[in-house]
Amino acid sequence: MKKIALFTTMILLAGMTFGQRFAFIDSDYIMENIPEYKAAEQELERISVSWQTEIEQKFSEVDRLYREYQAEAPLLPEEMRRSREESIIEQERIAKELQMQRFGREGDLFKKRQELIKPIQDRIYEAIQEIATRGNYAIIFDKSGGMTMIFTDVRYDLSDEVLQRLGYRN
């Protein structure tokens, strides 16, 4: 009886998947061929370098203040030493806060990336949806998304079609 149930289940599953179509895209390839994406990446890099320089300057200032303090500490009265220590600690706290504000999980760089890249990704996703609906695809995989694809037949690669749908030629 179990063998009959197993056989029936296998036949039903095989029948359900028989008519489904699958395809794949390479989102890295698609984005590399969109000029706006390249421009957005360059802008993010420029901003990132600028902010990193700003933060490094803050930490360099903290280091300078600390070295000066160490050289002068033996000559300073107790109250002035405490005041300088607090000032250095405060400057370091400000530098760390700026670093988190710029590069933290929900920081300025993350927000800027969302602002510049997300509209491009949304357009790509919409193009994929249109192609999937028109081509009657059940599933479209992204081979650059970390999913291992042992073999792919280029006949089912829709990356160039997505680029064409977005108005780009490769």
Image (tube, grey):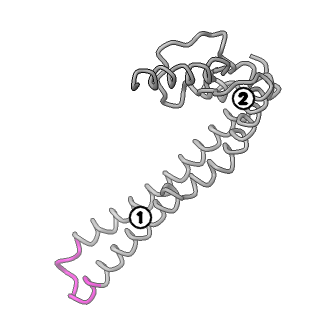
Image quadrant for the C terminus?
top right
Image quadrant where residue 46 sits? top right
Q: Which mark is drawn over residue 82?
A: none
- Dominant secondary-structure state across the stretch colored magenta: helix
Circle 1: element type: helix
Circle 2: element type: loop
Q: Position of residue 83 (x, y in %)?
A: 31, 84
| Residue topped by disc 2 | 34
Q: Is residue 17 above or below residue 83?
A: above
> In the rendered picture of this protein, how many numbered marks are placed on residues?
2
Q: Position of residue 41 (x, y in %)?
A: 62, 38
Q: Position of residue 158 (x, y in %)?
A: 69, 19
Q: From which residue to which does the magenta span run?
A: 71-82
The disc, 2 or 1, on the residue closer to the chain's N-terminal end is 2
- Residue 28 within the segment the image draws in magenta: no
Q: Is residue 65 left or right of residue 113?
A: left
Foreground: 18 or 74? Answer: 18
Foreground: 116 or 88? Answer: 116
Image quadrant for the N terminus?
top left
Please state which amino acid type lies under the numbered disc 2. Ile
